[in-house]
Image (tube, rainbow, N blue to C red):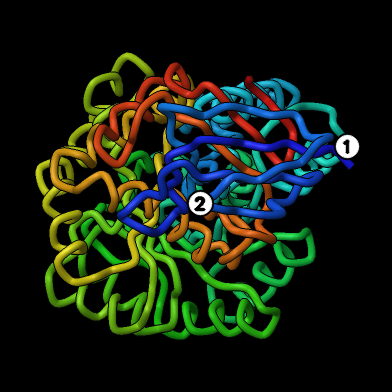
Amino acid sequence: MTLTLFRNATLFDGSSAEPTENACVLVEGNTIKEVSDSSLTAPDAQVIDCAGKTLMPGLIDAHIHVYIPSPALTLPPPPMSYVAHYGARFMQHALSCGFTTLRDVAGGDHGLAMALRDGFLSGPRFFYGGLALSQTGGHGDFRSPDTPTDLCACGAEQQGLSILADGVDACRKAVREELRKGAHHIKIMGSGGVLSPSDPLEYAQYSEEEIRAIVEECERQGKYAAAHCHPDVAIRRCLEYGVRSIEHGTLITEATAKLAAEKSAFVVPTMATIFALKDLGPAHGVSEVGMRKLHQVIDDALTGLEVMKKAGVQMGFGTDLLGEMHTRQCTEFTIRSEVLEPIDILRSATSVNAKLLGQEGRLGCIRPGAFADILVVDGNPLEDIDLLARNGEKLSVIMADGKLVKH
């Protein structure tokens, strides 16, 4: 079995604010075998000297959409063959930036997971939720308001992002169908959104009975529910009804942040997409309606990070970038650094996201028994988080599942 020995590293283990100096990490196959603050020897190992560099876990982006090649979410969508090629480009770019794990929260499917497994393309470790669930007229219903009911009344499934499900029975069936197809979690549209054409952003979506039914179906199969939510009212009710992961959480208040912390729930802010849409939205086909809704959240986006930090919320790391804007994935580090310390951002992108995925001790950490997803950074991101915001330029080594992707 292949052995790789990293020597003389400044080690960030995914959690500790104090790095370990002159650390050694021994990798056997795709697993970290040994971690030491003293010298290790392995005669048959490939040796990588990390003097002056920081060794850390591979990054995790917990909110992506690998099958959405444009933020102009209009029907009909591009052919699936085109979308698949876009997905391959997306994943290869993410890996080159040091993201060794992705969580797709609407769209990603078993087919892409199979292609990665069988080596048809290279990319990060992949957790997918299949089609998100949306009520009729909700954030996942991309029919324009002037579309007749009898035209495309099958709903939003045709654009590969979500499926319409109304009523408790329909919601249960939709959850069971996505779990049958291998979904690792189920996402619901819990409020209005920026890019959907007919739902006000500030209102909550889905009834209590529908949300509780979705949560129950997930929990009975050892899965969890995530919910797209911008306004505080939607965040709070989803937390109260058992949702484990709040996506965006943009307009969260102090009281609701405290509730999230009390319930040990996760919130995954997505700053990169908010500011990318502000800069580039109209040029990429975002409507005037979408841009008006964007400005309802952009002024409070960074404030929400401060509120959640103060309340002790488990904040994940997500980007939610669509289409060509996916190349701005690393801007999430820079934007968050306006209000958060580097250690908070690093934990979000490693150990917190690993816990969200149910992979604590296996991903997002450097410890014996963990998967060998490893980065070697030219410098110390605990002091300069911008080192991770340069699209992989400051990464001298990227190891994914024990394989050297960059060295």
Q: What residue lies at 66% left-to-right and 26% top-to-bottom?
A: 83
Q: Position of residue 36 (x, y in %)?
A: 57, 53
Q: Is residue 71 left or right of residue 308?
A: right
Q: Which of 390 and 36 lies nearest the eye of the viewer? A: 36
Horizontal placement of 233 versus 102: left or right? left
Residue at the spot 14% in from the left edge and 46% down from the top edge: 339
- Between the C-alphas of marks 1 and 2, the distance is 37 Å
- The relative height of residue 16 versus residue 214 in the rendered view (above or below) is above
Using the image, determine if residue 159 lies above or below residue 348. above
Specify the amino acid type for callout 2.
Asp
Mark 1 or mark 2, which has the lower sequence index? Answer: 2
- On screen, residue 181 above or below 161: below
Tell me the quarter of the image containing the N terminus. top right
Which residue position is annotated with label 1? Answer: 118
Q: Residue at x 55, y 32 (%)?
A: 68
Residue 331 at what x, y percent from top left?
32, 29
Looking at numbered disc 1 in the image, what kind of residue is underneath it? Asp
Choose between 335 and 35: the one closer to the eye. 35
Q: Crowding near pointer 2: few (<14 within 10 Å), some, many (20+)? A: some
Q: Is residue 355 visible?
A: yes
Of discs 1 and 2, which sits in the foreground? Answer: 2
Residue bearing the label numbered 2: 37
